[in-house]
Amino acid sequence: MTLYFAEGSTTTALTDQQLREALTACFEQLGQRRRVLALPPDFTRFNSRGGLLTCMTYDYFGDRLVDVMPALGTHVPMPPWQLEKMFPGLPTSLIRPHRWREDVVTIGHVPADYVTEVTDGIWTKPWPAQLNKLIWEGGHDLILSIGQVVPHEVIGMANYNKNIFVGTGGSQGINESHFIGAAYGMERMMGRADTPLRRILNYAQDHFCRHLPLVYVLTVVGSDGAGGLVTRGLFVGDDQECFERAAELSVQVNFTVVEEPFRKVVVYLDPEEFHSTWLGNKSIYRTRMAIDDGGELIVLAPAVQTFGEDQQIDRLIRKYGYRTTPEIMQFMQENEDLQQNLSAAAHLIHGSSENRFRITYCPGQLDRSEIEGVGYQYGDLQEMLRRYDPERLTDGWNTMDDGQRIYYISNPALGLWAHASRL
């Protein structure tokens, strides 16, 4: 097991050239490789630097990079404009879609007794380790899993082997993993590298994937303090140390502990990145530990036009809504459609305030009846944009003209916010 590169701190600012030099040095350490597969994130992780690193990988390997499969998970495939923006210069002939319901193979099961133990009895079934069959059967001599480590609602910290077993996983494994995370509790996991689901994925990797030539390329990306982003760390390796080093830095870079809980927090969802509440509810996941009881979250969502990324999941969200955990659990017991789609049930739990604070959604392309139908309060987007103008607000605390004090977040995907009372 090898850590090929590890550099990063809260003040590090790696340039594109430094990233290229580091990646080149790692590839030279790996030796001759003739059939390379890259597994970058999709467009929902545009700020990860994953696209840039994938293009650098192509620059180095050329025609030895034979397949590039964005780790979509359950997200929709990337349209041409997203591929062009995220992977400029990469031949589109290399792109392979991940069809999470069809193109997968189950490579083993994490035993039920182990799953029961690490989840404190919340889930008592064996967990199916599933991969896209291109990873398992493609005959590659190097598989590069590329992405960003950042606090995450399902597993605590995103990436590492989550990119494999969820990003390129199958419907059953994804569904059960999401539900395990939701049932165990977001607030018990977010910002932590060692969680029940992570232990399950580690078991699967250690027992079923040792023969795969997996190497992880992990970034830590943070704010530069002036409205931009900077790469604070790069970690390349083939074992858990690589992830743990990145996660340790990400907590320092991406985790904001606020001095007082939010009475009102306004979150902006970039139109290029967020088109659904499935993605846009990062605004809820990443701020909930900082919101005061009785507080309000206002979500400015100019491009949100649907609930689910998938038609089936969209239908389930519309049917059941973002209700409290006990309500969703009751719906599950009574309805086979939720039992058969645990990731949707998990998402409904994740997107609920549990009646602890108000959620006002201001979508550009969903109407009042749709928003109120899933349990949120509706806000008129244009009115809210006039009141809370993203061009005038700065990340952090802002005092409005009427004296109102709010907390503003321009991109919820980049971090996690919490008050000390909820840690």
Image (cartoon, rainbow, N blue to C red):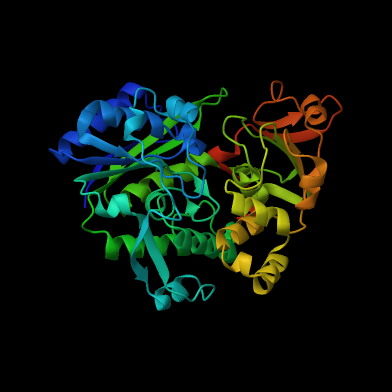
- Front-lying residue, 269 or 23: 269
Q: Identify the image quadrant of the C terminus.
A: bottom right
User: On the picture, is 286 further left or further right than 383?
Assistant: left
Q: Residue at x 19, y 40 (%)?
A: 35
- Front-lying residue, 345 or 124: 345
User: On the picture, is 247 further left or further right than 2?
Assistant: right
Residue 135 location in percent, x, y?
Answer: 30, 51
Q: Residue at x 77, y 46 (%)?
A: 370
The answer to which quarter of the image holds residue 50 is: top left
Residue 221 location in percent, x, y?
Answer: 46, 34
Residue 379 visible, this angle? yes
User: On the picture, is 209 further left or further right than 349?
Assistant: left
Task: Report the label total.
Answer: 0
Query: From this viewpoint, which residue is outermost toward the right?
Result: 402
Query: From this viewpoint, which residue is outermost toward the bottom?
Result: 113
The answer to whether residue 93 is above or below residue 279 is above
- Front-lying residue, 156 or 379: 379
Residue 232 location in percent, x, y?
Answer: 42, 33
The answer to whether residue 218 is above or below residue 192 is above
The answer to which quarter of the image holds residue 383 is: top right
User: On the picture, is 5 further left or further right than 39?
Assistant: left
Q: Residue at x 37, y 56 (%)?
A: 104
Residue 322 visible, this angle? no
The answer to whether residue 140 is above or below residue 391 is below
- Front-lying residue, 18 or 381: 381
Q: Residue at x 36, y 56 (%)?
A: 131
Residue 243 location in percent, x, y?
Answer: 36, 49
